[in-house]
Every structure is written in C-alpha cells, then in structure tokens.
Amino acid sequence: MTTFTYAQKVLFQHCDPAGIVFYPRYFEMINATVEEWFEARIGFSFAQMHGVDEVAVPTAGLQIAFNAPSRLGEMLEFRLVPKRLGRSSLDLEITAVCGDEQRLSMTATLVFTRRGAGKSVPWPDDLRAKIDNEINEMVEKDA
C-alpha cells in the first residue's frame, strides 16, 4: 500500500469572508481524512466504532504548520501516513497539497478509548494487526 490520499474541494463553508480556508475548518477536513483512512484501510468505520462498538480515537496531541493559504474552489489532496503504534496510541503524519504546493503539515497522536472509560485503553489485537500492517508496508516502501 501507499500513502493514503483523500481529495477534498474547498467549499464556501470552509472559508472566511476573504475566500481562504479559516484554519479551524482544516481540522474538519483532517478528521474526514482520518475517518476515511480508518474505513478504507483498516476496515473500521466511524459508524461501527462509535455507534456499535462504543469506542473512539480522540486526538490527544497535535502539531501543525500552515504553509500557504487555500482558496475557495481549490482541490486539496490530504495525505495520511501512520508512523507509530503504541499500546493505546497512534501517531499520524498528515499533509495537504494543492498541485505542487504544500498547504499544511501535521503530526497527530490519537488514542484508543472505550465509552465511559475516561482514559485510553489498549488497541484490540485485530485493529493493532491491521494498523501495524499499514505502518510496516510504509517502512518497507521507504527502504
């Protein structure tokens, strides 16, 4: 497998009055990318996660750099690479580009939680194996 990509068009709802993406809207786009990655690559939709299994993957930490503005009507390509899997955490690297120009770069740490637990819990073995496989395939690709 390769880097997971998810295309998102900059819509009016994402923009401030000047027609550029209002930075909090990027977080909605990033979350959509993460949600699509879980469903497409891990086989675990947020509908299953939240609605049936009563678990979640909230963001515990992030670092982001906004490299250039994005404008209404542009098509952004979000690229997600899983980097490290911990006992209950997952580090992701996410970038957004438009053509050849990088618009943002981010690292995020998600944690696996169970509703009502109030703290992180270990990844279930089946999910751990699928995420590990994604990370290992990226490492092999880079080698």
Image (cartoon, rainbow, N blue to C red):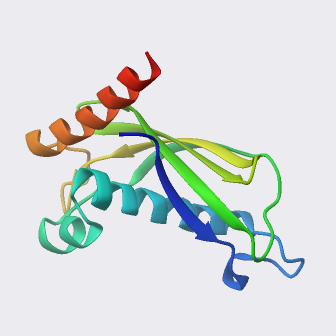
Given residues 105 and 63, the one toward you in this image is 105
Q: Number of labelled discs?
A: 0
Q: Residue at point 26% right, 48% down?
A: 112
| Identity of the residue furthest to the right in this view | 18
- Tell me residue 118's x, y (percent): 25, 54
Q: Nearer the viewer, residue 39 or 89?
A: 39
Q: Is residue 41 left or right of residue 22?
A: left
Q: Is residue 112 left or right of residue 83?
A: left
For image coordinates 82% across by 59% down, the residue present is 69
**Residue lying farthest left?**
125
Q: Position of residue 128 (x, y in %)?
A: 18, 38
- Among the 4 quarters of the image, the one containing residue 50: bottom left
Quarter containing the N terminus: top left
Which residue sits at x=86%, y=82%?
Answer: 17
Write the residue at 61% across / 57% down. Answer: 77
Considering only vertical position in the picture, is 79 above or below 22? above
On screen, 112 above or below 35? above
Q: Is residue 142 visible?
A: yes
x and y percent of residue 61 in the render?
50, 43
Q: Is residue 93 above or below residue 35?
A: above
Q: Nearer the viewer, residue 41 or 18?
A: 41
Q: Position of residue 143 (x, y in %)?
A: 43, 15
**On the picture, is 99 further left or further right than 47?**
right
Q: Quadrant of residue 53?
A: bottom left
Residue 122 can be seen, yes or no: no
